Amino acid sequence: MADAQDLLPSEQPVQLLDETGSPVAGADLPFPGPERLLAAYSSLVIGRRVNDQAGALVRQGRLAVYPSSHGQEACQTGAALTLAEGDWLFPTYRDTAAVIARGVDPVEVLTLLKGDWHAGYDPYAHRVAPQATPLATQLLHAVGVAHAARLRGEDTVCMALCGDGATSEGDFHEALNFAAVFKAPVVFFVQNNEYAISVPLARQSAAPSLAHKGVGYGVNAERVDGNDTPAVLAVLDRAVAAAREGKGPQLVEAHTYRMQAHTNADDATRYRSDEEVDPWVARDPLLRMEAYLERKRLLTKARRAEIAERAEAVATAMREGVSRDAEPDPSELFAHVFSTPTPQLREQAAFLADELSREGS
């Protein structure tokens, strides 16, 4: 059994870059290399463009809802880039940019948010679970997959994402307890963006930090500046490696901020002021990463243009794909209710088919 002192996270969130993009002295984690940082920057730019384009699609009536991760793109990037090909990502409804960074077609990712009845993509193709709207349910699923992989002797790590509000759900605590007891190779990645819709963190938890919640379950925990891309990569790298090496589940709390409203249906001005939001503008993960790369002369004009062009291509594919109207098939209402349709279901399907044939004739 681990000593409680060994499980405690750092007093301050781990940071490798300050708000100006300058390296922080005394950091004890390896700094990611240039090519990896450029890949991360590309993911940040694409993630920001994805958020902007999705917001526009909502305003045009093409998406039913969109929970933006604007300002949290370092967390999205870190979650996607620290996993190996055979690992699994279990996202929340706000993690669209992470799912796209994992390689899933943007149009397929947005199918659920468009209002369709299914997730839109094959979870097994990229090892990405469907985005979860109910809070914390995906954490238990991640633990189950990780535990099964461990029993089979597979070299698989599951990264389960959630927000600060989800840590108040029973499923969060059940997932941590089960994972710890059975040493499931799971990384619980909490994106603490300060608000659970309109409820501030102070009304969610009295703990010193959300990372401290791991101590009660015997789960090693760490805190990281969630707007510091190199730090997020380094901390998640260490957590994924520990889980893969059989050291049990890991809990990482990223301190970030939800810059925009909870969704397009939310009015954030009802519960927070502009004065509260303004300081976080200077902590923008994209600008911080950009400043560092420019200072190191790693981000050339040609590379910047290439990344911007790639991001615009993703946005164009989203816009065109989501705007394309699909012809609904009414028979799908009955196709996936039961593996073997009940007599009542067959009767209803036959009734609908008869009605449609009459309309057609």
Image: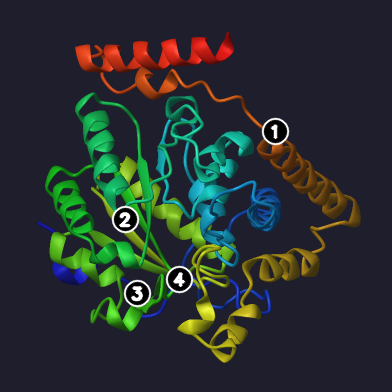
Front: mark 3 or 4: 4
Q: Is 300 on the left or on the right of 259, as rendered?
A: right
Q: Is 97 on the left or on the right of 171, as rendered?
A: right
Front: mark 3 or 1: 1
Residue type at mark 2 is Leu
Residue type at mark 4 is Asn
Disc 4 versus disc 1: distance between alpha carbons? 34 Å
Q: Which mark is residue 135?
A: 2
Q: Which mark is residue 324?
A: 1
Q: Which callout, 4 or 1, points at the residue further toward the start of the chain?
A: 4
Q: Which mark is residue 10?
A: 3
Q: Is 96 on the left or on the right of 208, as rendered?
A: right
Asked if residue 93 is positioned above or below residue 13 in the image, the reply reads above
Q: Which mark is residue 193?
A: 4
Q: Which callout, 3 or 1, points at the residue further toward the start of the chain?
A: 3
Image point 44% across, 59% down: which residue? 235
Front: mark 1 or 2: 1
Residue type at mark 1 is Arg
Measured from the top left, where is residue 124 in percent x and y? Answer: 43, 26
- What SS does tag 4 mark? loop
Quadrant in which the N terminus appears: bottom left
Measured from the top left, where is residue 145 in percent x and y? Answer: 27, 34
- What SS does tag 2 mark? loop
Front: mark 4 or 1: 1
Quadrant in which the C terminus appears: top right
Disc 3 versus disc 1: distance between alpha carbons? 49 Å
Asked if residue 231 is positioned above or below residue 142 in the image, the reply reads below
Q: Tell me, what colour scheme is on the image? A: rainbow
Q: Which callout, 1 or 2, points at the residue further toward the start of the chain?
A: 2
